[in-house]
Image (tube, coloured by chain):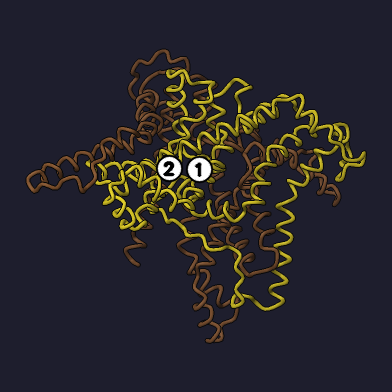
């Protein structure tokens, strides 16, 4: 920091007309230097912990690197070829896609319904927000612990509750038919607060005049919801949808903690497979290749969103 | 790395810096008719009950004796009476206090470093016309698309060669890179009128002085929002600390709890007591700072997660 201060030349320094252009050049040079000095701490971390691993990961995908760092020899496209022919890669990508579909729909729709209901202005606003948003602040491990216990086949609350009505509940997380849906329910419970919040903010940004004008025209509540609220929420819905798709594609924590990818790999998402290949199978090179296949999918979603949103802003 | 939030979304452009309105302002003009309001209330009440149930069930279990927690038929309210046995065991025998300390230490460090380096860079990108500025902005915004999760493999390799595996710095450093936060702060600094700084420049104040004594105080709300967001992300981060730390005395709360689930297995009351203890700080903080947290998440969340 001291260097930045020492280099500081106040703009009033150049007085003599002859020295003015020299002063300006020097000033520009010092501005250049200062700009880079201020950015330096961030750029060092950025380069070291983001850009370098991104490049290095791509390099690793062409090598046979193991966890011990040995065998860094170049193997060309071998990892990539193997990944594309590996049924486990496709199954785990399929699980990720299935989880994304199952979780995104309720996480967008239920969040919207909750926000619309809360926005009616019922008493106890802080309580509704506490109830629906608070889980979002919990660590994944805490959430998984809570729900492992809810889903416990003999001692859990869900099957106890079902038992009161004479229903024998499934084994939830241990049953391949219900494991994925159980994880999805937990995820909806956990993360809906974020989308709920975005919708709530969007609802409160809708100008009152729109509703007042509609009332004057004799529109009822339902009519107003359909022709004012829903269209006004469209940009938020697109945003929430894309953020949710990207978030769901990256699922790892709760599945690792609740099912470990099981039973029989039925819930294993692609990130868990990458983790297993790299850190329990010690094949970092191969894990990198799968990571990059996954990365391309994420990019496709991001680019699709950018195209949609730029087209939207051109229209507007 | 992204400040990993639950199912972390990556940033997408454009970054709408949402000015969160005072949530909860009741507007009479939107009130529906009475029966609709009652129906809405009932639906919300049922859903809120469903949402609070897992937490309540965990809390009730944590006050049971281990014998009762594992007994059939299942009791809802502890019938042997409420006991703090599970909490005492957790606090005296396990490593939970140690993990909580590790979490606090690493999250505070991540927050402090992230806010400092992001604000400095954001200020330079906003105010200083230096060569390469435009290129840097493009690079930083483009980098937001890189999902941190795919970097675990090369990042772990890097940590091995830097000798940072199983250290606090190993947990902290990769989490301080928050490109979205730099971008948010730059956007905020762009909105501060330059006249304020110009006068100080004329008086011969250095850039650093202007940044510290004029720009930063004006930016308190956005800095607070960024800090809250980064802190919660770091506190809850699971994947990275889980990868980089194996030594159980260096684990953070989320990673430590994971090892216990597999180790204790059937000590249900104790497991729930630990989860409740781990959840408690954030729930309490949320109750006190609900407005700020909600505003912070709404302002930075879209970009940050």
Element type at mark 1:
helix
Frontmost residue, A27 versus B92: A27
Disc 1 and disc 2 on one polypeptide chain: yes
| Residue A264 visible in the current orientation | no
Q: Chain of mark 2?
A: A
Q: Is residue A140 left or right of residue A293?
A: right
Frontmost residue, B130 versus B5: B130
Q: Is residue B171 left or right of residue B178?
A: right
Residue farthest left in this picture: A18
Q: Chain of mark 1?
A: A
Residue B116 percent across, percent down from the top left: 43, 39
Residue farthest right in this picture: B80
C-beta proximity under 8 Å, tags 1 and 2: yes
Task: Please tell me how crowded label 1 is: few (under 14), some (14-19), or many (20+) other residues with Cα within 10 Å.
Answer: many
Residue B57, numbered circle: none
Q: Which residue is under mark 1? A: A249
Residue A298, numbered circle: 2
Residue drawn where x is 41% and y is 38% of the image: B117
Residue B71 percent across, percent down from the top left: 88, 35
Q: Which chain is yellow?
A: B
Task: Please tell me how crowded label 2 is: few (under 14), some (14-19), or many (20+) other residues with Cα within 10 Å.
Answer: many
Q: Is residue B33 left or right of residue B128?
A: right
- Shown colour of chain A: brown
């Amino acid at each position: 920091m001291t260097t930045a201060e020492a280099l500081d030349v106040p703009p009033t320094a150049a007085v003599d007309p002859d020295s003015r252009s020299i002063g300006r050049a020097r000033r520009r040079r010092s501005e250049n230097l200062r700009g880079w000095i201020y950015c330096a701490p961030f750029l060092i971390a950025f380069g070291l912990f983001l850009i370098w691993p991104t490049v290095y990961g791509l390099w690793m995908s062409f090598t046979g690197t193991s966890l011990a760092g040995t065998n860094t020899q170049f193997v060309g496209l071998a990892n990539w070829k193997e990944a594309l022919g590996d049924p486990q890669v496709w199954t785990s990508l399929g699980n990720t896609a299935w989880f994304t579909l199952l979780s995104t729909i309720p996480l967008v729709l239920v969040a919207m319904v909750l926000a619309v209901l809360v926005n009616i202005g019922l008493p106890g606003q802080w309580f509704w927000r506490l109830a629906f948003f608070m889980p979002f602040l919990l660590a994944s491990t805490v959430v998984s612990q809570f729900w492992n216990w809810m889903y416990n086949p003999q001692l859990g609350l869900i099957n106890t509750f079902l038992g009161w009505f004479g229903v024998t509940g499934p084994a939830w997380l241990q049953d391949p038919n219900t494991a994925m849906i159980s994880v999805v329910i937990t995820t909806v419970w956990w993360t809906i607060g974020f989308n709920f919040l975005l919708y709530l903010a969007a609802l409160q940004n809708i100008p009152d005049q729109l509703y007042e004008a509609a009332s004057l025209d004799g529109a009822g509540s339902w009519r107003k919801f359909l022709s004012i609220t829903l269209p006004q929420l469209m940009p938020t819905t697109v945003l929430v949808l894309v953020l949710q798709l990207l978030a769901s594609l990256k699922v790892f924590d709760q599945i690792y903690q609740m099912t470990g990818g099981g039973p029989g790999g039925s819930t294993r998402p692609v990130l868990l497979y990458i983790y297993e290949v790299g850190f329990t199978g010690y094949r970092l090179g191969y894990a990198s290749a799968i990571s990059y296949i996954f990365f391309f999918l994420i990019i496709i979603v991001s680019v699709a969103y950018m195209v949609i949103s730029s087209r939207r802003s051109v229209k507007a | 790395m992204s400040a990993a939030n639950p199912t972390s979304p990556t940033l997408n452009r454009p970054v709408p810096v949402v000015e969160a309105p005072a949530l909860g302002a009741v507007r009479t003009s939107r009130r529906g008719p009475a029966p609709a309001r009652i129906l809405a209330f009932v639906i919300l009440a049922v859903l809120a009950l469903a949402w609070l149930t897992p937490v309540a069930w965990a809390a009730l279990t944590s006050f049971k004796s281990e014998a009762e927690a594992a007994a059939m038929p299942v009791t809802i309210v502890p019938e042997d009476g409420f006991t703090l046995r599970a909490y005492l065991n957790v606090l005296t025998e396990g490593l939970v206090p140690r993990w909580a300390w590790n979490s606090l230490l690493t999250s505070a460090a991540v927050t402090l470093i992230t806010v400092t380096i992001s604000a400095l860079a954001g200020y330079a990108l906003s105010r200083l016309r230096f060569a390469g500025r435009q290129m840097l902005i493009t690079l930083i915004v483009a980098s937001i698309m890189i999902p941190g999760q795919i970097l675990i493999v090369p990042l772990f390799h890097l940590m091995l060669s830097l000798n940072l595996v199983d250290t606090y710095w190993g947990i902290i450093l990769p989490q301080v890179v928050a490109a979205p936060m730099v971008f948010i702060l730059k956007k905020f600094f762009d909105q501060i009128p330059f006249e304020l700084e110009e006068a100080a420049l004329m008086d011969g104040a250095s850039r650093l002085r202007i940044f510290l004594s004029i720009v930063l105080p004006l930016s308190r709300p956005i800095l607070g929002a960024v800090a809250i967001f980064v802190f919660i992300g770091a506190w809850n981060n699971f994947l990275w600390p889980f990868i980089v730390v194996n030594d159980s005395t260096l684990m953070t709360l989320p990673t430590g709890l994971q090892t216990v689930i597999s180790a204790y297995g059937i000590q249900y009351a104790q497991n729930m007591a630990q989860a409740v203890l781990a959840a408690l700080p954030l729930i309490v903080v949320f109750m006190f700072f609900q407005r700020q947290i909600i505003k912070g998440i709404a302002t930075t969340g879209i970009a940050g997660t």
